[in-house]
Amino acid sequence: MEITQAPKFQVIPATSKHIDYATTITDEMENSAKARGTGIAKRTPAYIQTKMEEGKAIIALTDTGEWAGFCYIEAWGHEKFVANSGLIVAPKFRKFGLAKKIKEEIFKLSRKKYPEAKIFGLTTGPAVMKINSGLGYIPVSYSDLTDDEAFWKGCQSCVNIEILRMKERQNCLCTAMLFDPAKTKQEKEKKALRPDFRNNLKLFERWVQIKQAILLKYKKTKQKTFSIF
């Protein structure tokens, strides 16, 4: 049955008492990526459980205890960079603004745990880009992200890893966005996306579609070239 009224959600830091939700979370991460036709670095239930036990995750539950959403923190480059990863919302709860609430809470948790760290993200989702922009992230090149090999190793399970390798880790289907706490609010506003682009989700979607089309065409061309030899 379709839910027509927004349930009451608890959006809270995850702890060890939430580890039973780990398999549900990783299954939905994989199913969501397949449905979108995009890649995602795969995570195991054990990995998600560890994030919960370390207090580096946000979970959303209904007032009846049903799982609704999740996101976790990863630190890289000697904690100079932090990523808010694995944002996922259960399909039936995706029209109630829950993703934004989870992103806001994981952002606050990241700032609390790593106040000096740059917070970055890689995503193919226009909605996530818009949420990030509202939090003060700006689009950046891949070279502005962490050079920690452990982070990039996580991309190896993504279906688009060939594109990342072909572009020598300088571009891929994901869009890179960064929040730098060293920048003042005024400086961030000057560098932010132009207002019409920032506030119009359709423009985000169109931009992502064009980028993906170009890179996928590049991938196919490379594959045909290699198949000749």
Image (spheres, rainbow, N blue to C red):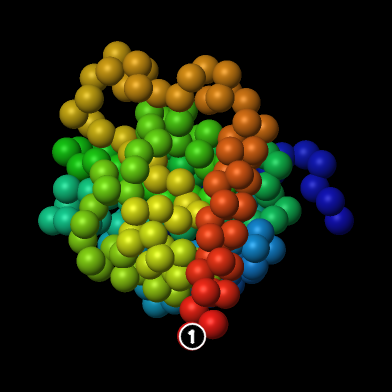
Residue type, mark 1 in image? Phe
Is residue 43 shown left or right of residue 188? right
Residue 229 shows in this picture: yes
Percent position of residue 113, x then y: 23, 45
Residue sitting at the far right? 1
Residue 165, percent across and down? 38, 67
Which of the two residues, 26 or 63, is positioned nearer the viewer here?
26
Residue at position x 35%, y 39% in the image:
140
Residue picked out by circle 1? 229
124, above or below 66, in the image: above
From this viewpoint, is residue 107 visible? no
Relative to 68, residue 48 above or below:
below
Left or right, 134 with reference to 203: left
Q: Quadrant of the N terminus?
A: bottom right
Picture coordinates of residue 190 (x, y %)?
35, 16
Q: Residue at x 65, y 63 (%)?
A: 37
In this view, 121 is above or below 97: below
Q: Residue furthest left?
A: 78
- Front-most of residues 25 and 84: 84
